Image (cartoon, rainbow, N blue to C red):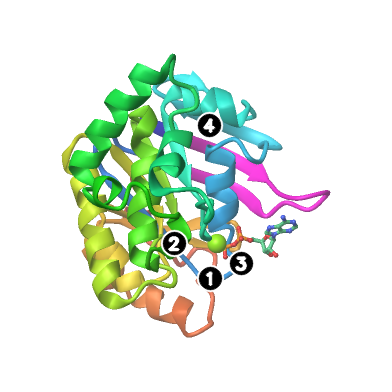
Amino acid sequence: MLTISGLFAGYGSGDVLRGVNLTVQDGSITCVVGPNGAGKSTLLKVVSGLLRPRVGSVTFRGAEIGGATPRKILECGIVQVMQSRNLFPELTVRENVELGGFLLRDASAVRARIATVTEQFPIVGERAGERAGQLSGGQQRMVEFARALMLDPALVVLDEPSMGLEPRAAAMMYDSIRQMRDNGRTILLVEQNVRVGLGLADHGVVMETGRVRLEGTGAEILANPQMRALYLGGTIEEGEVPAGDRGR
Ligand SMILES: Nc1ncnc2c1ncn2[C@@H]1O[C@H](COP(=O)(O)OP(=O)(O)O)[C@@H](O)[C@H]1O
Ligand SMILES: [Mg+2]
């Protein structure tokens, strides 16, 4: 569904991403992990159009989207939920969710989508008139997810969605991600909690210093001794990655 090849991108003159190759399969959860500064958020920004690739290509359903505007990418069916809190705290829950439908034709289309996303996220109905800022962190995340689904995206991009959530709220959030996948959406996720993220994922990807260093099922990656080196602050030596781990 999404294919990234030979991707170089960064800020100003330096490249943060230095030759990223990655394929996200339709209907799967792909989880990207890696140390701080590896370029995970930068990769997601390229996918959602917030950052232009310097070199390389990003194709979505066969069409090149690298360097397209964020709006164009939204219209293609890719929605990103940002890393930090991003509801408007003074607006109501419903108003926040409505904003997610800004590309829809008219008010009746917006109402129809709100009814649909409220089925998946009942809090949107239950707390509709309350200011979003009154909700707990976990509840706000659910509202952010609901807002992201307003355009019925095919690919949902999530940057560290568990950040700042208590364990119970995080567990509910992960259930929602699974539910999105089970409803036919494709998920590209960055997760700081490596065990949980890879446990959830159909496909796991380890990034380090702007490149993909390991790929495989979540279980394969968790079992890989090189993962330990990476998370103890070491690096994976060039050439040490078995060919089988670079598959897909
Ligand atoms: N807006 C920015 N301007 C300049 N450098 C940035 C910016 N955002 C991130 N970086 C740098 O890019 C590198 C990768 O960052 P990032 O993609 O956020 O990593 P990760 O999400 O894996 O922790 C870091 O060295 C970071 O300092
Ligand atoms: Mg990040």
Q: Would you place residue 153 above or below residue 157 in this image?
A: above
Residue contact between numbered discs 4 and 3, judged by CB atoms under 8 Å:
no
Q: Residue at x 50, y 52 (%)?
A: 87
Disc with the residue nearer the chain's start (4 vs 3): 3
Q: CA distance from mark 2 to mark 3?
A: 13 Å
Disc 3 C-beta below 8 A from ligand 1:
yes
Disc with the residue nearer the chain's start (4 vs 1): 4
Q: Residue at x 20, y 57 (%)?
A: 175
Of badges 2 and 4, the one in the foreground is 2
Q: Residues within 10 Å of mark 3 (few under 14, many from 20)?
A: few
Q: Please, what is the three-letter code of the amino acid marked with disc 3?
A: Gly
Disc with the residue nearer the chain's start (3 vs 1): 3
Q: Residues within 10 Å of mark 4 (few under 14, many from 20)?
A: many
Q: Residues within 10 Å of mark 2 (few under 14, many from 20)?
A: many
Dot label at residue 160: 2
Nearest the viewer among 53 and 154 is 154
Circle 4 residue: 58
Q: Please, what is the three-letter code of the amino acid marked with disc 1?
A: Glu
Dot label at residue 134: none
Circle 1 residue: 237
Disc with the residue nearer the chain's start (1 vs 2): 2
Would residue 132 be found to the left or right of residue 202 on screen?
A: right
Would residue 182 be found to the left or right of residue 226 on screen?
A: left
The magenta segment: 3-23
Disc with the residue nearer the chain's start (2 vs 3): 3
Of badges 2 and 3, the one in the foreground is 2
Disc with the residue nearer the chain's start (2 vs 4): 4
Circle 3 residue: 37
Q: Please, what is the three-letter code of the amino acid marked with disc 2?
A: Glu
Disc 2 C-beta below 8 A from ligand 2:
yes
Q: Secondary structure at mark 1?
A: loop
